[in-house]
Amino acid sequence: MRTKRLLSSFALFIALANLSANSSATSNDSLRAMYEADQNERKAEQVDFSRIINNDSERRAAVLNLLQTSKLNSAEDYFHAAMIYQHGTTLEDIRMAYSLSNIAVILRPDHQHYQRLRALAWDRMMLQLNKPQWYGSQSMQQGADQDWKLYDIDETAVSDHERKALGMPTLAEAKSEIARLNAELQKQRSSTSEKPKEVKVVKPVLISFQRDPGTGYELLAIDRCLAMFWIKLSERGMTEALSAQQASRKTRLFVLRKEEKDVLALLDGRARLILNDTSSEACFFDYVAYVDENRHLILDLALDDKVVAGPGTTFDVKPYKYFRIKLEQLDTDLKGRQIKLLQAEKIVLTDMRQ
């Protein structure tokens, strides 16, 4: 990880030096095309987040290659590259977004869009570090049935005057927008409650679970902890997990966090999952299970993999990633007493759009 960070920093240094020597260069057309694709996918009427996650990863790899080969030629290029990294999922991605946007601002300090993106990247970086955001740009909705809310804000860090100068809403305006979104949700819920849909509930006792390596690899590509969650369900049996869920309506499932090589060993059958009570690094999930009107079994997952603890530690879990696992073809699978077809999609809207 340190090597990757040093490589990225070195690439930024070399690219900025080259740009300073050739300030009249035109912007990179291929990078502009990647930026436009990034934006258009998020403006679609129906957003496919599972597809976006894969495309985002490919775009970040392409941007890093452009940096390493000194192909960023203008402040606009750095802005486009920063926006692509802004949609990453790791602290390293967001740090890169902040660095790139900072270069764009240095080159074009009069450009408000560049300054605004730098502020957005800063807020996301603060969240990754478990610190309050400054500008109030990051909000969340844990699931479709939950209200929107702003992440914690350090209201003393910057003023509303500074926010307005960046083209961003004041804190009062940001809170008003959250209230508006929740009012719209309440209207939708009221409308839905007036015409309730028939939802067929699957009895947990009917459900068993078979591990499918292909599914595991698909989930691993999205998130390591998500793959571990699925492995644990398959080894413990979904019946047990959903029975506990049905009894409590909110079960916290402890999952060890493994390095990617360890997850691969589990998927390949070269290792067995060890279920310890404590770990120096762990993933926690809060999840809700239900069956929708299309006979799909749905698991809405809230994930916290920032927890670092030891024996006797009281865990303070603050979920910051949200996924939905959809198990399709439920009727067919129940007849064979197995469920093995999964589709994972991210259900956070704001962090994927900002």
Image: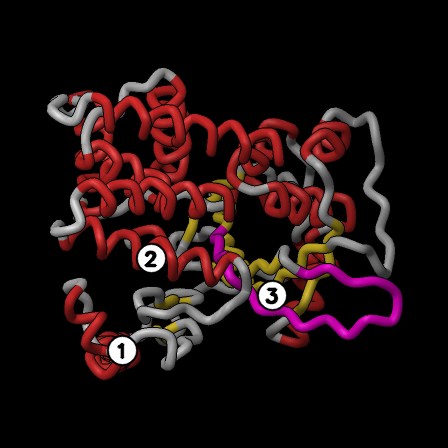
Percent coordinates x, y for residue 198 in the rendering: 37, 68
Q: Earlier in the sequence, mark 3 or mark 1?
A: 1
Q: Compute the Cα span from label 2 to label 3.
A: 18 Å
Res 163 → quadrant: bottom left
Residue drawn at (73%, 55%) of the image: 282
**Rendered image: mark on residue 349:** 2
278 left or right of 130? Answer: right
Q: Which mark is residue 30?
A: none
Residue 222 placement (x, y as % from top left): 51, 39
Residue 29, image quadrant: top left
Asked whether disc 3 touches disc 1, contact meaning CB atoms under 8 Å apart, the reply is: no
Q: In the image as oriented, which residue stretches furthest toward the front? A: 21
Could you say whether the residue bearing mark 2 is in a helix, strand or loop? loop
Say if residue 6 shows up in the picture. yes
Mark nearer the viewer, 1 or 2: 1
Left or right: where 243 falls relative to 29: right
Q: Quadrant of residue 41?
A: top left
The residue that mark 3 highlights is: 286
Which amino acid is tagged 1?
Ser
> Which one is closest to the eye, mark 3 or mark 1?
1
* Residue 159 image label: 1
Residue 114 position within the rendered picture, expressed as x and y whole percent measured from the top left = 20, 49
